[in-house]
Image: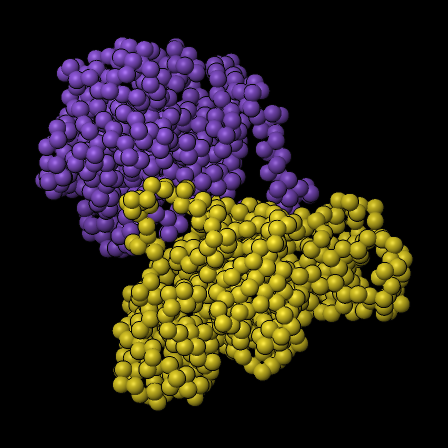
Chain colours: A yellow, B purple
Amino acid sequence: MAETELTGPDIHHWVDRFSAALDRNDIQAASALFAENGAWRDVLAFTWTIKTCESPGDIHAMLSATLAKIEPRNWRVESGESAAEGWLLFETNVGKCKAYLRLEEGLALTLFTALQDLHEHPEPTGKLRETGLYNDGDKRNWRDRQHAEQASLGEEVQPYVLIVGGGQGGLALGARLKVQNVPTLIVDRHHRSGDQWRARYKSLTLHDPVWYDHMPYLPFPESWPIYTPKDKLGDFLESYAKIMDLNIWNSTEFSAASYNQDRACWNVTVQRDGETIELHPAHLVMAVGNAGFPRKPEFDGASTFAGEQYHSSEFTSGEAFSDKNVVVIGANNSAHDICADLVENGVKPTMIQRSSTLILRGETNSKMARPLYSEEAVEQGLTTERADFLNASMPLRMSEQMQKQMWDHVAVADADFYETLAQVGFQLDFGEDGTGLFMKYLRTGSGYYIDVGASAMVADGRIALKSGVAIERLTSDSVLLSDGTKLPADVIIYATGFGSMEEWVKRLISPEVAERIGKCWGYGSGTRGDPGPWEGELRNMWKPTAQEGLWFHGGNLQQSRFYSRYLALQLKAQYENLEIEVYN
Amino acid sequence: MAETELTGPDIHHWVDRFSAALDRNDIQAASALFAENGAWRDVLAFTWTIKTCESPGDIHAMLSATLAKIEPRNWRVESGESAAEGWLLFETNVGKCKAYLRLEEGLALTLFTALQDLHEHPEPTGKLRETGLYNDGDKRNWRDRQHAEQASLGEEVQPYVLIVGGGQGGLALGARLKVQNVPTLIVDRHHRSGDQWRARYKSLTLHDPVWYDHMPYLPFPESWPIYTPKDKLGDFLESYAKIMDLNIWNSTEFSAASYNQDRACWNVTVQRDGETIELHPAHLVMAVGNAGFPRKPEFDGASTFAGEQYHSSEFTSGEAFSDKNVVVIGANNSAHDICADLVENGVKPTMIQRSSTLILRGETNSKMARPLYSEEAVEQGLTTERADFLNASMPLRMSEQMQKQMWDHVAVADADFYETLAQVGFQLDFGEDGTGLFMKYLRTGSGYYIDVGASAMVADGRIALKSGVAIERLTSDSVLLSDGTKLPADVIIYATGFGSMEEWVKRLISPEVAERIGKCWGYGSGTRGDPGPWEGELRNMWKPTAQEGLWFHGGNLQQSRFYSRYLALQLKAQYENLEIEVYN
């Protein structure tokens, strides 16, 4: 284990004082145990939502509203990383909780608390798993029961939860709910589970290393490659759905939904293999992801262009384009990967960079993940679950500061690499406030490329670059740029990203609900694409929204894995009719 | 972790003396460090086979033959369970090795040594895994490469290893060889992977608990039931084959094989979807299991019997027999499970017990597995890999003694349970020398039932029992027993077991090769079905046989998992042309 048993008096002492203050309902004293710049991040344990309180005052207000109902108790130090930080355990009226505490001069700089398991409905895993034997007088074996459930769910039996989207997010949440025995149906428009990934461009692999990407309950084998190829991920997800025994309707389009306030359920319409089916789930989880809905700008003259035009999501391989002039619009992940694929197929594509891009060397990315997600972490006994918890324990404001420092180092360490790009005119940034890739990801989910080879092609000219230009218009056989350049073009590929989650709500539910919900993703950093006010948490993600029964799930594999746990706990609590009061 | 860092002077002291003796080639001194009744079990590290030396003299002989070539070195204590036992590490010319040592009065009572990884060809897992990126100038992505391999293997490219049988054994070995990059093809007669299990009787579950049953690389999720239902296992195995990217020809019958000494490869004939294909693997692994070939006695009058006759492997469910007289011949696992299924379908079957049976309560079985394979073991940080190693570290002679003691306790603890069976005339045994189920399993693989419910039905008469009788003959509508009883019968089910592995060799290769190989399984205990001389290891299993290029793999999921590692290492070493000298 990474932790030693040894813990100095500090965190023990703090926990003793903190729990004593809570016990005597002395909110003032409890709040005073936080540093002025201290923050308390809570996931469900106190607030039944995901919330960061960033001052003693905020903390005071939160405790005033929640303490009496929650009745936290039995606080103890589980293990310490040092005298100044470590793992805590406690309980509430509702369930078992875990926490991670960091002290600075005896006061809490960060406290992260999270509900882990419900007292009355503990997750039936480990010691609590089923026997697999059926002695209930019913003659059906496991297969009979599984078939019956699959045949009835969505027909005679309504799912309690409907998950829209069967990618890694929908499957991870589906698995958690299946284990928790919450009747759940996943609908997905693809023919087979995993086709979300299989259908993408040929050279795609995950850009994060394997240690970051495990699915819940069924980690990748230790022989798994560092960067999972897209088809291999697709195949794994398909097997995952089977092994975890999920109820999935493939080839099913979600076409409309409205909430029935009186009956406290949704009226959902789906088209399954062409047949229209009405569903009435109590909860609707949008797990369609950031990358579900292609965004394609409409340039002047686009209709007159005589060649082929594709969105990046439609591109599979450059094999067909070997003698063509190909223009790729965009300079983020997809644009780079597609250009690299074109180069490998003998094309010299032109990449049009309209605004600056953050580039991160794949190797540097793996190093950044290293303390928590790496072979070294595994060897030190740091489980993925504990790594996720530590990762979540840092509030966003402090993450920004730490990330900025880290990126200052990256700029120096990888200076030669960046110089090769600058020399060909590639416009680089580290985010407008220098906080780097991960904050960009949380703010807008775009604006970067994790380099797995294309940057060298940009630097040495195998990929032609036009940067700092806008598209003026298209002609029948060219792209006219704002600097007057006329680029001959047979094929135009729009690597221009994907629509937002709220756009899905607007299209599939209603503009009114979309308006009520507001923006999804982003945390109010006040930077481009992520306007304030400061929220301190991703908007609407994995937590109650302004629309009853509507939830958002998504993100990369790490977020999917971690937050699916807490979204499942919220849905399980509702399914079991627990009394839930959300603090906002 | 179960181990503490603390270790007393004893195992350190022993290891220092032992390694010093080996270093100065003082075989006498090294052998003298073993107790008179001490034993050294080696898997590949010294002997390139699986061998237990059971006296200082045996050990002296083994070291004399192997020491100079193996050059063991760098012995150290990894961690101690106590001052008297613990884990060792060392290296040889060939690879990294692990050992487990138990001392008694300063001398080795047991030493278990095993080769773990080859120096020159370490398993590419963990830190050594592939990147998943292909920068070799070849435009093919992962899927292209996978498809090409699958299309060519067995056609343009000969497999180095051919595994016959794609059950848990074939798949586990196939996975290890795939990870080790040894070109391997698995042929299996079933239509889909997992059908071996799906096709069996409806109520079947594994009789061992989940912690004992994990496959290599991809453990079951922590939500997995304790006793895996057969279809769930079948589905898991099918997904396993996909996730581990195995090359399998399903619907393929292995029909003949002969060894070509000059070319050092096999001429194998298979029928794949009706097409005859010749294969030329260097190595042939029989992984058809103990339960591949139905054994059905030929009773007098069988051809005149007007009803239905099935072997247990053909039985799927008692649903069709609800108004029938059903006689089940046999009183082991299958007979019990089938009778229970019949009872649940409204039948009152008659079980004919021809010889005594060992019955073990499922709960007691789980308790027996507990120190190594249980949720408690998991909580204490005992990995499956370490549990397997500990399990293998006990030589068979000592296992027999320990098992006998344990079964003496079982007889007392479960006396009431056994009494209920004795009262209805059920003939019980604990093995002819009282050493219990596991030794029976290793000797003959039969003669027992792990009770998951049928024993209560025998005790209360829902299953009628005729015990201590032989079958005299069949008439058109009855079974005549040796005690004169005439049992009316519409259906006869032969729960009479399966043929031996050597029978497969005789049928599929040749009687000559079968003769040369001799018996498979059993260890020469000198009990019924397992004649002496004492071998101290299972005959022909997972180790070199008298026929070059012929190997046997099989057993339960635990054995499959553990020994597939060492069989794969032997095949990898041959594939890489390492110099191998087998000590016999």
Residue at horizontal 66 percent and vertical 54 percent from the top: A453
Q: Nearer the viewer, residue A276 or A88?
A: A276
State the quadrant of the N terminus of chain A. bottom left
Q: Is residue B17 depicted above or below A256 in this figure?
A: above
Give the image quarter of residue A422: bottom right
Q: Nearer the viewer, residue B320 or B498?
A: B320
Residue B101 appears in the picture as rendered: no
Instruction: Point out residue A529 in the picture as x, y percentages from the top left corner.
Output: 66, 74
Q: Is residue A477 left or right of residue B457?
A: right
Give the image quarter of residue B454: top left
Q: Nearer the viewer, residue B380 or B447?
A: B447
Residue at horizontal 84 percent and vertical 61 percent from the top: A302
Give the image quarter of residue A35: bottom left
Residue lying at the far front in this picture: please name it.
B323
Residue at horizontal 46 percent and vertical 73 percent from the top: A50
Instruction: Point out residue B162 in the picture as x, y percentages from the top left corner.
Output: 49, 26
Q: Is residue B419 left or right of residue B313?
A: left
Instruction: Point out residue B35 in the picture as x, y percentages from the top left corner.
Output: 16, 34
Q: Is residue B358 depicted above or below A158 in this figure?
A: above
Residue B135 appears in the picture as rendered: yes
Residue at horizontal 60 percent and vertical 81 percent from the top: A532
How many numbered dots are placed on residues in this image? Answer: 0
Instruction: Point out residue A284 in the picture as x, y percentages from the top left corner.
Output: 52, 64
Q: Is residue B418 left or right of residue A491?
A: left
